[in-house]
Amino acid sequence: MSHLGERVSALVDGELNHHERDRALSHLAFCADCRAEVEAMRALKSRLRSLDGPVMPTDLTMSLLRMAEPGGPLPPRERPFPASRTFGGAPIPSMHSVAPPDNRPRGRAGGPRRARRAGYVAVGVASAAVAIGTLFVVGGGADPGPRVPPVDMFANQHRNTVPFGGSATPTLSPTP
């Protein structure tokens, strides 16, 4: 086994398993350097255990305890605006003294929502009727069967025409 290294602290703290502890103790029997390091670590740990804990100043402790106590009554709130101004005994209306007018619609509870829903339904029904009517007109009403275009009209349409203003009868050219 090489020198203990980091295992010194684990040996002093009792964190090694049985097999590792036996190997470390057998190493200490032959290595004076590691034995001295383990003794120094044990002395340091015993000295640290003998020290008292940190002491807090009493004034700091008392100020922290006072922060946890309930305080006295809160001072009265100062209003950002004067309560009321008067002119000849009559109050002068201001932005903060008069309630805004109630301009909500009157009527049954939920009236505006019901009216809005009814409008949406009416628009939806009208849109569906327009769409069905459009399909009926485009489709031609009742479908009598498959429509076959007159093929003869298209087959003979361009037979007698000559492109670019030439004659319809073939002519022989003098040069091949």
Image (spheres, grey):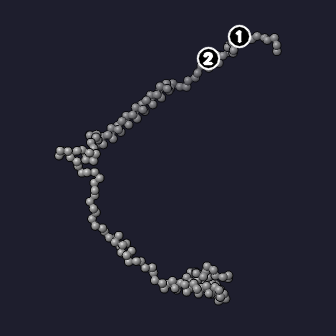
- In percent of the image, x 62 and y 87: which residue is there? 35
- Residue 86 appears in the picture as rendered: yes
Task: Look at the picture and state if 86 lies above or below 154.
Answer: below
Q: In which quarter of the image is residue 68?
A: bottom left
Q: Considering depth in this image, is 171 or 102 the residue closer to the camera? A: 102
Q: Tell whether 162 sits left or right of 135.
A: right
- In percent of the image, x 64 and y 16: which residue is there? 157
User: How far across and how far down the image is residue 141, in percent?
Assistant: 47, 25
Mark drawn on residue 167: 1
- Residue 17 appears in the picture as rendered: no
- How dense is the environment of label 2, judged by Cα within 10 Å: few (below 14), some, or many (20 and up)? few
User: How far across and how far down the image is residue 125, in percent?
Assistant: 40, 33
Task: Look at the picture and state if 73 lies above or below 38.
Answer: above
Q: Tell whether 129 sits left or right of 27.
A: left
- In percent of the image, x 62 and y 20: which residue is there? 151
Q: Nearer the viewer, mark 2 or mark 1?
A: 1
Q: Considering depth in this image, is 128 or 41 the residue closer to the camera? A: 41
How far apart marks 2 and 1 lie (CA) works out to 23 Å
Quadrant that contains the N terminus: bottom right
Mark drawn on residue 78: none
- How dense is the environment of label 1, judged by Cα within 10 Å: few (below 14), some, or many (20 and up)? few
User: How far across and how far down the image is residue 162, in percent?
Assistant: 69, 14
Q: Which residue lies furthest to the left in this view?
A: 89
Q: In which quarter of the image is residue 117?
A: top left
Q: Residue furthest bottom?
A: 29
Q: Considering depth in this image, is 118 or 133 the residue closer to the camera? A: 118
Task: Look at the picture and state if 7 lies above or below 175.
Answer: below
| Amino acid under disc 2 | Met
Mark drawn on residue 153: 2
Q: Earlier in the sequence, mark 2 or mark 1?
A: 2
| Amino acid under disc 1 | Ser
- In percent of the image, x 55 and y 84: which residue is there? 44
